[in-house]
Image (cartoon, rainbow, N blue to C red):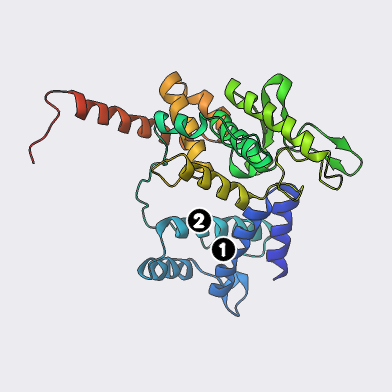
Amino acid sequence: MDALERYLTRLRVERGVSPATLKSYRHDLAGLVRLLGKREWAELEERDVRRWVAEASRGGLSARTIARRLSAWRGFLDELAAQGAVAANAARAVRAPKMPKRLPKALSPDLAVRLVDYEPQDSFEALRDKAMVELFYSSGLRLAELGGLDLRYFDEPGYRSESWLALAESEVTVRGKGGKTRTVPVGAAARLALGDWISARAAWLAGHRDADLRPLFLSGRGRRLSPRSIQLRVKQLAVARGIPADVHPHVLRHSFASHLLQSSGDLRAVQELLGHASIATTQVYTSLDFQRLAAVYDAAHPRAKRKE
C-alpha cells in the first residue's frame, strides 16, 4: 500500500532507521495490512485490534512480540491520523498482555575475563577475533555498531564514515539506534588487541589489493565482516575458551554494563555509554546487580538459609 511505503521511506530517510529495523517494521506492519483486509484505513476500529491481541495471545504469540507489533502499528496509524486519513489511532489504547520480567543475561566477571584474557595465535583471524571480543567487552557496543566501524574517519567523495575507531585517542565513535552518535572509551587491553590486529590487517592487505580499506574488521575475502559472521566467531571463541554459556555479542554488552555498574554505581554514566535514550532502560542492570548481591547473601549469611 502506498501509505505504508511512504511511512517506511520516511523512517529510513528522516529517522535514519537501519535496514534490519526497517525489515522488522515491514514484517510487523504486514500483520496490520492482513487485519485490515479489503477495508480502507478509516474503517479500522479499536475492537479489531483488541480482537487480534486476544487471538494472538491464545495462539501462543509471546507478549513481547505482541507489544513490538502494536508499537509498530501505533507509529504508522499516528502518521495516518496526522495526515487526516483516519479519525483516530485504533491501536493507541490497546495494550499487550503483561510481559514477564526478563533480566539480561551477563557473564560473571571471572567468565568474562576468561573469555578475553588469552594470547591469540599470530594469524589474521585469531588476532581479529581477539580484538573484537576485547572491544565488545571494553566498550559495550551493539553488534551492528562494532560491525559498522571503520579503521579511522573517512571523508571522501561519495563516502563519509558514520562509525570509526580513533586508536590514538582510545575511543570509538558509533552511530547507534535512531541515528544517534556517541563516543565511547576503549580500555587498555582492547587498545592493545586492536593495535595487534591493525598491524596484522596491514600486512594482510599488502597481498590483497582488491580488499576494502575502510572497514576495521575484515573477512577473509577482504570485505566488511557481516553481523552473522561476527556472531559465529564470538560463539566459537566462547566454546574454545570453555565458557559454559550461550555467548553472543549482546551477552558481552550486558556484561560490560552490569560489571561497570557494580564497580561504579553510576547509572547515568552507564546509560550514556550504552547509548540508551531513557534511563529506565538502563535501570534493569540494577536488578541484575541485586541478584548478585542476593546470591552472596544466601551463600555467606548464617541466617540466610531457608528450610526446605
Q: Say which quadrant the N terminus sits in.
A: bottom right
Q: Amino acid at mark 1?
A: Asp
Q: Quadrant of the C terminus?
A: top left
Q: Is residue 293 visible?
A: yes
The residue under label 1 is 28
Whether 262 is drawn above or below 283: the answer is above
Q: Residue 59 sits in which quadrant?
A: bottom left
User: Which residue bears the numbered disc 2?
Assistant: 68
Residue 273 position, x and y percent, is: 57, 28
Q: Which mark is residue 86?
A: none
Residue at 39% across / 30% down in the picture?
286
Spot occupied by residue 259 in the image (x, y as percentages of width and height) = 44, 27
Element assignment for label 1: helix
Between 200 and 192, the one lying in front of the other is 200
- 52, 299: nearer the viewer: 299
In the visual, does 252 lie left or right of 230?
Answer: left
The single residue placed furthest to the right in the displayed view is 157
Q: Write the residue at 45% across / 19% down.
A: 264
Position of residue 297 measured from the top left corner of the image (x, y, whole percent) = 22, 26
Q: Residues within 10 Å of mark 1 (few under 14, many from 20)?
A: some
Rendering quarter of residue 171: top right
| Left/right of residue 137 with respect to residue 15 in the rendered view | left
In this rendering, does residue 185 appear at all?
no
Decide which of tag 1 and tag 2 comes sooner along the chain.
1
User: Which amino acid, by three-letter code, is at mark 2?
Assistant: Arg
The answer to whether marks 1 and 2 mark residues whose Cβ atoms lie closer than 8 Å is yes
